[in-house]
Amino acid sequence: MKILLIDNYDSFVYNIVGLLRRCRADFPNLEWTVVKNDCPLSELPKDFDAIILSPGPGIPAEAGNLLDIIRTHADTHPILGICLGCQAIAEVYGWRLRRLSAPRHGHASLLREIDPADPLIGFLSSPPLRRSSPAEPACGLQSASLATPAEPLSPVPPACGCSQLPDPRTIGRYHSWVIDETPRIPNPHLQITSRDEDRNIMTIRHLTRPIFGLQFHPESIITTQGQTILRNFLRLSIP
């Protein structure tokens, strides 16, 4: 499997590469090519199976050819947008952005109002969280879960005074903008699948295409189930 990783001029792209390396335990043939967002569309690699859009500074309109990359490949390739990449997907499909009252940099939140039908994060929707069947569904886009972590997700009672395991819904956030609740052009195919403690939109997905947006950073050390979320996307992207 070959991933085209769009670098939005952000150091977090190296953390994403590190997360992809760890995913090779499940996908031995996983490869990736990192390309800057201002690469002309005609010069983008032609041989790839899915796209990951990295975080980045500013807003999507300032991020080189990011919006055009989504428009060009939305009908042909799975796409995962992270932070700025998530916002870019939202804008392509007719949603606005708004600035937060205060930035969230290195901020830990819990995902709330999780849609169990989201193939990437649906496994986090029903505490106590249980393992799903190892058999994969026939249609990944309608699955609540493609993979669950190797360890049980339900809280483990502390022993000998040890602290409990972190909540699996914990996410790491680094952003000043979020998707506005009111879309510029209502799009029935784009759906909100989770929120934060203030009901800001944290994840979105396209209902008929394997296109997903994460406002948080799965590659952050704060995000407890980031590798599982990325593995779920990769499983959907297998050619």
Image: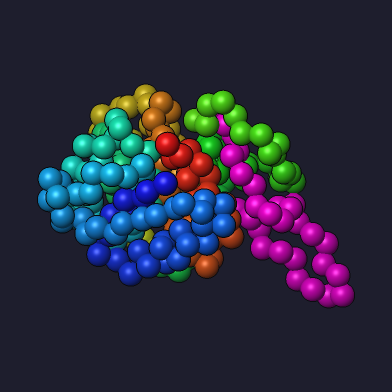
Residue 144 part of the magenta-drawn span: yes
Front position in the image: 225 or 3: 3
Give coordinates of residue 187: x percent, y percent: 32, 27
Asked if the magenta segment contains residue 127, the reply would be: no
Which portion, as a residue range, is magenta?
142-170
Residue closer to the observer: 92 or 175: 92
The outermost residue toward the bottom is 161
Answer above or below: position of 102 versus 76.
below
Q: Is residue 63 above or below residue 131?
A: below
Residue under the point 41% across and 61% down? 16
Q: Which residue lies furthest to the right in this view?
A: 160
- Please indicate, yes or no, whether residue 190 appears anywhere in the rendered image: yes
Image coordinates for residue 80, horizontal then vertical, percent:
39, 46
Q: Is residue 130 left or right of residue 59?
A: right
Q: Nearer the viewer, residue 110 or 65?
A: 65
Asked whether residue 178 is in view, the answer is no
Tell me: residue 84, above or below residue 12. Answer: above
Does residue 91 lie above or below 215 as drawn? Answer: above
Residue 73 is drawn in which quadrant? top left
- Residue depicted at x 21% and y 37%: 72
Residue pictured at 60% horizontal, 53% vertical? 169
Predominant secondary structure, magenta span: loop
Residue extending farthest front: 29
Left or right, residue 66 beside residue 90: left
For residue 190, which quarter of the picture? top left
Give the x, y percent position of residue 152: 74, 53
The mark tally for this picture is: 0
Q: Which residue is drawn at 71% across and 64% down?
A: 165
* Quarter placement of the C terminus: top left
Q: Residue 238: x percent and y percent?
A: 46, 39
